[in-house]
Amino acid sequence: MALICPTPAVFLDKDGTLIDDLPYNVDPDKIRLTPGVAEALPLLTKAGYRLIVISNQPGVALGYFDQAALSQVEQRISTLLAGHGVRIDDYYWCPHHPRGTIPAHTAVCSCRKPMPGLILRAAQEHAIDLSRSWFIGDILHDVEAGRRAGCRTILIDNGNETEWLTSAERHPHWVVAGMREAVNVITAADPFYRLARRAAAPRQFERPCAECSDG
Ligand SMILES: [Mg+2]
Ligand SMILES: [Zn+2]
């Protein structure tokens, strides 16, 4: 039996977090990365995180677009990020809505955030260690989904959360202004970057210190 070592992931909400929030947009030409994404995400790739997009797409259930239209959204985002050396490992969409107009997608499901279904599926399919993983989003539904899956959560407070219905499950571990700050939180907690910082720090002793038993 092959042993698979679980890796950490950073789960990313799409609208308002990874790209500018244009409600129900599936036109690739209108997709823009949010400020900081191009500079910050390469740091996560370098540290070995899987990057996985987790997004509610009720526009499918509401009949605004077909699920197939989401593949061009995936392609566009992947192309934009590839230019910065970043690879999105996978995209997971919830096409449902409890009050949809397309019967096949009208349902109360376990994959629509704040439920953690998509995160749990991604974790299984990509051998992800959820306890070392993070969820970055811009509303409290993202935080709740991340917490329910056992991840640490970062809320980008960019004005998209307006209701602030709070509970223990919806309490973000960190609240930050943007993607750069979110990635700073993750790298500050990550052993890879702690070691890199220690290696770069000036050495205290040129020679082994005689006072110290271990030199
Ligand atoms: Mg969002
Ligand atoms: Zn769903």
Image (tube, grey):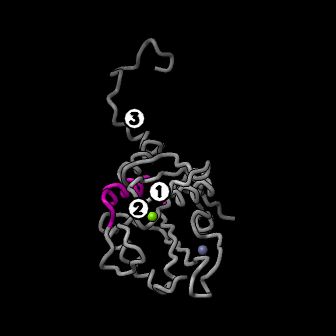
Mark seen at residue 61 = none
Q: Does residue 75 appear to the left or right of 7 in the view shown?
A: left
Q: Are marks 1 and 2 in contact (CB under 8 Å)?
A: yes
Q: Name the residue tied to disc 2.
A: 17
- Whichever of callouts 1 and 2 sits on the residue coming sooner in the sequence is 2
Q: Name the residue tied to disc 3.
A: 198
> Which residue corresponds to the image point at 51% horizontal and 54% vertical from the top-left?
164
Q: Foreground: 210 or 154?
A: 154
Q: Quadrant of the C terminus?
A: top left
Mark 3 or mark 1: which is in front?
1
Picture quadrant of residue 20: bottom left
Q: Which residues are magenta?
A: 33-50
Three-letter code, disc 3: Arg
Judged from the image, the secondary structure of the residue bearing numbered disc 1 is strand
Q: Are marks 3 and 1 in contact (CB under 8 Å)?
A: no
Mark seen at residue 136 = 1
> Which residue corresponds to the image point at 43% horizontal and 45% vertical from the top-left?
185
Task: Measuring from the top left, give residue 192's x and y in whole percent.
Answer: 45, 45
Residue furthest top as drawn: 211
